[in-house]
Amino acid sequence: MQATRVSDLLKIKYPIIQGAFGGGLSSTKLLATISNAGGLGSFGAHHLSSDQIRSLSNEIFSMTTRPFAINLWISDHDKNGLQLNQKDFEKAYQVLKPYFDELKLPKPDYPSRFGEKFSEQIEAILEVRPPVFSFVYGIPDKTILDECRKKSIITIGTAITPDEAVALDEAGVDLIVATGFEAGGHRVAFLKEAEKSLFGTLSLIPQTVDRVKAPVIAAGGIADQRGVKAALALGAEGVQIGTAFLATEESNAGDLHRSKLFSSEARYTDLTRVYSGRLARGMENKMMLEHVGHAPYPAQGWFTGKIKSEAIKQGRADLMSLWCGQSAPLIKYHKAEEVFNSLLIGSLNEEKV
């Protein structure tokens, strides 16, 4: 892997991007490790308030002088997801009540809000000026993209279909992540519903490369040097790695989640809306298999967040969201630097083999 347009635009040594984990799974330690190693570290901040984003930025700038990305969700709610009325709130609670009871959790009070607003978060992003602003679930308004250019903020958008990639390209986004359905975490569809937008990486990457001008970063199912080579052969100019970095000690995943990623249970993943209200891939467990019905995002995530937090405290993996990609059985390393270096061996520095 020689220098590519991805590494040139991002001003990084190697075109390797650490996936941005939402829901508190990102860590500044992991981000700094990857950025300092010559890749692009990322932090998923869609659950943070604007003030928390400002504090996060200060912390990151104190840990690395290298480029990094802060990631947001453009679409911050589904229909009725920000404000359920009391009747719908009660209905959503009753569906999840067996899990609250099992964990001995009290019924939660009706909140003033269920999630953060993108309109407030983006103000903080433009203020703190991270080197890279990455995003999922849509395309920012032209005024936002223009402001990013004025402030020399590189933009990375994510597509899960070739049509979404074309839309990002036509909007003038600098770089495009094309992510196949093998990836762990959320299926970040924005043109059609996620269930009708399921492209595998092997099919998605060449179709995307053929239709867009912006450099393409491949994601989904890439966990070792073989995946890196395959992505480059398909025309991608960079790779984004998620699960392999999530499994490392530097991520903010809990010990139980990390241990599960190295277990035989990681062979069995599925797509579900149970945890957030949006389609996402994780390990099969009791809650995923038993649950029927869900509230819209982010209300569903607000409810299940309380369940997941308590499940972690009680060591109940069967009630946690165990985000996991289909290539988890390939991961071997427990430290982020080891993962990063393993991606270079054979694909970047064959003389080291």
Image (spheres, grey):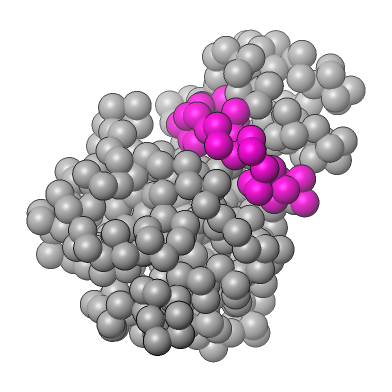
Where is residue 310? Give x, y as percent.
82, 35
Residue drawn at x 65%, y 84% is 62
Is residue 153 visible in the rendered structure shown here?
A: no
Where is residue 352? Give x, y as percent.
46, 85
Residue bounds of the magenta highlight: 255-284
Quick one: which residue is furthest to the front in this view?
A: 353
Residue 252 lies left or right of residue 217; in this view the side is: right
Count of numbered circles in the view: 0
Residue drawn at x 65%, y 48% is 262
Is residue 178 visible in the rendered structure shown here?
A: yes
Where is residue 304? Give x, y as percent.
67, 30
Residue drawn at x 49%, y 65% is 18
Residue drawn at x 55%, y 19% is 294
Where is residue 301? Give x, y as percent.
61, 33
Closest to the observer, 346 or 147: 346
Residue 193 lies left or right of residue 265; in this view the side is: left
- Locate the N terminus by quadrant: bottom left
Tell me where residue 65 sits by quadrant: bottom right
Residue 101 vertical placement versus 203 (above, below): above
- Locate the C terminus by quadrant: bottom left
Closest to the observer, 76 or 16: 16
Residue 4 covered by magenta stretch: no
Residue 259 covered by magenta stretch: yes
